[in-house]
Image (spheres, coloured by chain):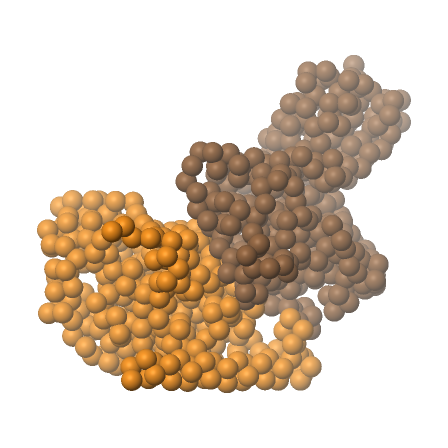
Chain colours: A orange, B brown
Amino acid sequence: MTTDIGKFKKDSPMSGTLRMERMPHIWCPGCGIGSEVNAFAEAVKRSGIDPKKLVVVSGIGCTGRVAGYVDFDSIHTTHGRAIPVATGVKLANPELTVVVFSGEGDLAGIGGNHLIHAARRNMELVVICNNNFTYGMTGGQVTPTTPSTAIASTTPYGNYEYPFSLPFLADAAGATYVARWTSMDARNVTQSIEEALVHKGFSFIEIISPCTTLYLRRNRLGDGVDALQHYQENTVLKHGCDTRETAIDYQGKIVIGKFVEKIKPTYLEAVDKCCVKLVGDDYQLYGKTIPEREAEEKAEKERIAARKAAMQAEEVGANE
Amino acid sequence: MKTVTADPKGVDAGPHFMDGDHALAEGALAAGCRFFAGYPITPSTETAERFAERAPEVGALFIQMEDELASIAALIGGAWGGQKVMTVTCGPGFSLMTENLGLAAMTETPMVIANVQRGGPSTGLPTLTAQQDMMQARYGPHGDNAIIALSPDSPQECFDLAIEAFNLSETYRVPVIILTDETVGHMHEKVVIPPADQIQVVPRNNYSGPKEDFRPYKFDCQGGHPMTRAGDGYNFHITGLVHDERGYPVMTAEQGKVVVTHLMEKINGNADKIIRLEEDQVDGADIVVVSYGITSRIAVKAIQDARKEGIKVGSLRLITIWPFCEKRIDELAGKVKAIVVPEINYGQMVLEVERSAHGKCAVISVNHCGGAVHDPEVILDAIRKANK
């Protein structure tokens, strides 16, 4: 029996959230990015947000290819610049929900400056960071999160640098939603992205994920299943954990959970507050006053709630 | 392209006394620019400051980004978010911006970048004038792509050309660079801003047809193809990779040829429509001085003095730098003894003049390493020698 690829693509539950005409994707067997994209697509559906108002921005690298597969407005940028491009999208049209989906080399290496400044501004973005401890697309070089002593193609005798703990970095820089999961924690990842999509502020979700072809193989850590086994045995769930205690040692314990969730004015709220004081109630951004924008936001929130309720009812129906 | 009259909100009509940097910001606002992302750098910062000051009353948004890499990246996002966008910088910042100048060219994203040139290389002469980034504006990003660059010679022209820059940028979906210099940027002169109904602007051309027919690109070597705005429901995809008309990556030499040819020829093929020059007594001249920006105003003195000495000197001022006016130079080269090219660099645009003259006349470079304008006497000497 041969599989009808066209029919498979059309009937796929991912049709409508992924550009099925672009399948098959480039990711290796055992890579965690696929399950993360799956969780993301599921979170978008469950959240009730309008997919037309969702923009996905990626940088360069394996995870940078996400923007090319999701069936939303999507931008594949230069290396490290996904966050400032996303900032431009959000500021040009504040109605949009803007998600940055990229890897740790892109976001914390070459784009590290943008990460901390977007967090500092509490720019309303959702940043999903696939952390696989390696530059996969270029052949497995050391990254800013590679654990000390791990072998990479550019640290053939073991990594002698200190790695970043990304939740600590994001928290310290001012992120108002910070979580870490592994690619095995599909439900938590989905739940976390769903929360972040409606969180008003800068959200940072790190997902520890196996790079089977390069990181695992070079360190003789087995295959994708072995990595998931490792996650199962070594993750420690600690919601609200002090992010200073989230460092990851080579093959050591991985603290997961939702570490930060708080509310403070976003960048655009701060702009509004300043400008309305200056200009008065007539203050407009792109031709809309604050009350007009607030009314639109309220109406959109109601539509989101209605879509979410309908989605939940459908799920209950399907389960019965 | 169809034009509309300017949105009066951005037009501060009337006579002003302002410098070129401020006039750039006013021109942008008049052209309908409502999103500005920038990073401070002397001698360009006043444009950002003016925009930041005016933004609340106009209903625009200014953001100071963490660096120039981020500033131009934010413009790409802002343009696809639906706004007309601008940034300002000079040499060191422009070097950083070349990264995403390439992405903007590749994704055919309209934007305006003003480069208020200062002396280089590197940190160079931060507060002093130069015209040393002429080639960088054209050839800065890696890979082949064409941009448009304009050079104003006064604060009034900073205002006028800012509007022109936006109009060209929207028409050809290409980054347009305003190559001004510290002298024009900091020179205060009278700037008359016309009422909004006398300013014609090219509005963003957004697609409105059926979703299945939407294509973000059309590789027809022309401008004018509509783009879209995030949130309008067309699920666009854009990438810096070589792509097809849907915006999807295609990793082949054949597609690379299609894309690069389009990027180059939509500008080169429309050069006659794009190029603006200002000529004075060129017909019958023995010598023509080709200059641009502040140097064209210095050259006026030398040209006047030479004429008093009985030398037949014409002036050709480049308002459009890129695409270069190679046809006009070729025509002139067949009629004159020499072309004299003063510029505040070690000889950049003179290379284009030489190339375009095809050896039909002498081409004399009057270079200057930056930090000041020419002494008109030096240009006059070059004219005298050329006339011998």
The answer to whether residue A50 is above or below residue B4 is below
Question: Camera-side residue: A141 or B113?
Answer: A141
Residue A301 picture location, percent across and down: 49, 83
Q: Is residue A265 left or right of residue B19?
A: left
Residue B44 picture location, percent across and down: 61, 53
Residue B54 picture location, percent across and down: 67, 68
Q: Is residue A185 left or right of residue B198?
A: left
Q: Is residue B121 visible?
A: no
The image quarter in which residue B347 lies: top right
The image quadrant where one finds the C terminus of chain A is bottom left
The answer to whether residue B180 is above or below residue B290 is below
The answer to whether residue A263 is above or below residue B42 is below
Question: Camera-side residue: A261 or B42?
Answer: A261
The image quarter in which residue B321 lies: top right
Q: Is residue A153 visible?
A: yes
Return the residue found at the far front: A1
The answer to whether residue B213 is above or below residue B244 is below
Point 73% across, 61% down: residue: B30
Question: Camera-side residue: B171 or B175?
Answer: B171
Q: Is residue A123 left or right of residue B10?
A: left
Point 44% across, 61% down: residue: A71
Point 61% across, 40% down: residue: B220
Point 74% across, 30% down: residue: B290
Residue A208 picture location, percent across and down: 24, 64
